[in-house]
C-alpha cells in the first residue's frame, strides 16, 4: 500500500484504507475500485491523499501516529466545544473559555500519551 495524491489518481486504483468523513463515518471502503466520479468527489471534499493498493508495496503497512478513534474523538470534541463556546459566549464568555480549556487540555494529553507509547514513531 502506498500514499497517493488524490488529484493524480486514475480510475481503477483500489483503496488501501477506508476513507472517513469528519464525523468518523466511512465514505469509501478499503479495497474499493475507484471511478472518476469518486476521485472527483474526493478532490471536491479536499481530501489531499489516500492510500491505494500497490503490489510493489504490499509488505509496507503504514501506521498512523494517532489511532483513528482518538483522532475522530479529538476532532469531534474540538468541533462541539467551539460550537458550545459560540452559543454560550453571550451568556458567560469566561466560563465557556474555561470549559474549553479543560476539554482541549485532555485532548492534548490523550494524543501525547499515545505518541509516547509509540516508540517507533518517536525515533
Image (spheres, rainbow, N blue to C red):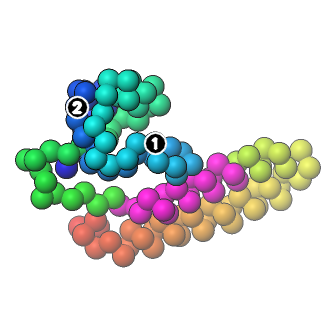
Nearest the viewer among 102 and 29 is 29
Is residue 74 in sight in this rendering? Answer: yes
Q: Which residues are magenta?
A: 65-81
Label 2 or label 1, whichever comes before in sequence order: 2
Image position, residue 76 (x, y; %): 61, 53
Image position, residue 99 (x, y; %): 75, 62
Is residue 51 in sight in this rendering? Answer: no
Residue 84 among magenta residues? no
Residue at 66% across / 63% down in the picture? 103
| 103 lies left or right of 121 | right
Give the residue at mark 1: 27
Residue sitting at the far left: 56
Classed neighbour count for the residue bearing mark 2: other residues with Cα under 10 Å, few (<14), some (14–19), many (≥20) = few
Residue 80 among magenta residues? yes
Give the residue at mark 2: 12
Image position, residue 18 (x, y; %): 37, 49
Residue sitting at the far bottom: 117
**Residue at mark 2 to residue at mark 1: CA–CA distance:** 17 Å
- Above or below, 45 against 89 in this view is above
Quarter occupied by residue 107: bottom right
Amino acid at each position: 500500500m502506498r500514499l497517493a495524491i488524490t488529484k493524480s489518481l486514475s480510475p481503477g486504483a483500489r483503496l488501501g484504507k477506508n476513507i472517513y468523513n469528519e464525523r468518523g463515518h466511512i465514505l469509501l471502503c478499503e479495497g474499493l475500485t475507484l471511478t472518476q466520479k469518486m476521485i472527483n468527489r474526493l478532490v471536491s471534499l479536499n481530501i489531499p491523499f489516500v492510500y491505494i493498493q500497490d503490489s510493489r508495496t504490499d509488505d509496507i503497512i503504514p501506521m498512523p501516529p494517532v489511532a483513528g478513534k482518538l483522532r475522530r474523538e479529538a476532532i469531534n470534541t474540538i468541533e462541539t466545544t467551539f460550537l458550545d463556546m459560540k452559543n454560550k459566549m453571550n451568556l458567560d464568555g469566561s466560563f465557556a473559555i474555561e470549559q474549553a480549556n479543560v476539554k482541549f487540555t485532555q485532548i492534548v494529553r490523550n494524543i501525547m500519551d499515545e505518541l509516547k507509547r509509540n516508540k517507533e514513531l518517536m525515533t
